Amino acid sequence: MTHISDTHPSHILNYCPRCGTKNFTFDEEKSFTCPNCTFMFYINAATAVAAILVAPDGRIVLTRRKFEPRAGTFDLPGGFVDPMESAEDAVKREVLEELGIEVNEFRFLASYPNEYVFRGISYFTCDLAFICPVADLSALKPADDVSEAILIEPNEIDLETISFPSIVFLLHKYIKTLKNS
């Protein structure tokens, strides 16, 4: 691991969750071990999804984050994949929760790692982006953790206003596919 941020779990987790022993030891890479009961805890990436909702005219939907982290910045609709949920089902659920839109068609675009800092601790994610053509966006209504939704031409996006480096990468990747088609 090249850089460990102040919010990395190695700075937060001090006690074994099984036996409570202090000195829960981090291996400087991706796991903790308890010297007392030998319990091991791995830091694995959580799966998250992002939907690039494409209107018939080619514009896409950006959402404004209502809550921290990165409240007020633009994002793609999406979120964490629930336990025992497929990424595709998560896309459908998240878009419906956040925008009231049903997604029936999607194509995988790319993935990118992300460090999602929430309430002082880092959660490492693997963000999966899906391109979702949507015939009708007239029912689009921001809800849940979205304060606003806008339709924008992909080449007009100000990447400085985008929430996370992973979303910037995924938008770059999407825009590149448009140029190559």
Image: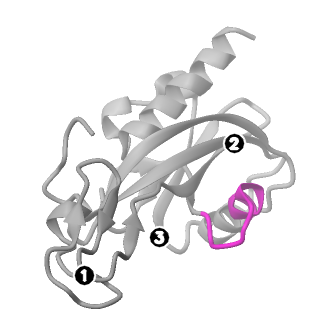
* Disc on res. 145: 3
Q: Quadrant of the C terminus?
A: top right
Kind of residue at badge 3:
Asp
Mark drawn on residue 130: 2
Query: Which is nearer the eye, 130 or 47?
Result: 47
Residue found farthest to the top: 180
What residue appears at the point 23 percent right and 35 percent down from the top-left corner?
Answer: 2
- Where does residue 137 sit, x and y in percent of width and height? 74, 53
In the figure, 152 relative to 63: above or below? above
**In the image, is residue 136 above or below residue 173?**
below
Q: CA distance from mark 3 to mark 1?
A: 42 Å
Name the residue carrying label 1: 36
Q: Nearer the viewer, mark 1 or mark 2?
A: 1
Q: Amino acid at mark 1?
A: Asn
Crowding around mark 2 (Cα neighbors within 10 Å: few <14, some 14 to 19, many 20+) is many
Say left or right for 126 vs 24: right
Q: Magenta stretch?
A: 81-92
